[in-house]
Image (spheres, grey):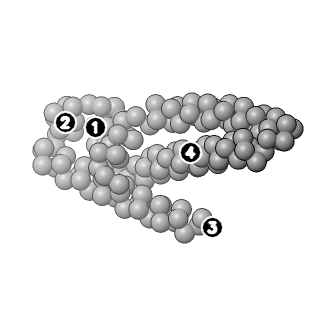
Amino acid sequence: MQERTITDILKNKKQMIQNIAEKRRHIYEDLKFLDEQLSSANEKEEKETYGYLIERQISRMQNTLRGLKLEECRILLVWESFYQLDHAMFELMNRLYVKKETWYTVESELHVSHEYVKAKRKEALGIIREAMEQGEDQYHSERP
């Protein structure tokens, strides 16, 4: 996972989770509609032609739902890793990305150098990236 992706997740968690929930809601509505269409096709004995297309569309939407679930899990895993950072790294990353404070503000209020902030930021991102890789490996090994 790239640094930019991690920092975007830290900055935009709430909106990203809301967007996933909204997409899910729309997909469930569409799946309900498609299920009704499939039932109608079965009743009219159009399953071989029209029903097949509907089943393929349902399958694609179910795959999209799985992708959204994976995306949501990745977001939550970034945050879980973020919570596990030591105090100094957590405070620094929280101020830079969650609270969206400027580097200058963080450096001056914490009384640390720019180099210190860069080093701690790099270390924190490495820890989160490593946790993500381990989490994704676990996810793929647990799937059938």
Q: Check disc 2 and report the residue beneath it.
A: 103
Q: Whole-percent x and y of residue 103? A: 19, 36
Mark 1 and mark 4 in contact? Answer it, CB < 8 Å: no
Q: Nearer the viewer, residue 106 or 109?
A: 106
Q: Amino acid at mark 4?
A: Thr
The reply, left or right, for residue 74 in relation to residue 115 is right
Which numbered marker is on residue 144?
3
Instruction: Compare marks 4 and 2 and give the one earlier in the sequence.
Output: 4
Judge depth for marks 4 and 2 and give the one in front.
Answer: 4
Which numbered marker is on residue 64?
4
Q: Whole-percent x and y of residue 80? A: 47, 50
Task: Identify the residue at image location x=85%, y=37%.
Answer: 44
Q: Amino acid at mark 3?
A: Pro
Q: CA distance from mark 1 to mark 2?
A: 7 Å
Q: Residues within 10 Å of mark 4 (few under 14, many from 20)?
A: some
Instruction: Compare marks 1 and 2 and give the one earlier in the sequence.
Output: 1
Q: Quadrant of the C terminus?
A: bottom right
Mark 1 and mark 2 in contact? Answer it, CB < 8 Å: yes
Instruction: Compare marks 1 and 4 and give the one earlier in the sequence.
Output: 4
Q: Amino acid at mark 1?
A: Leu
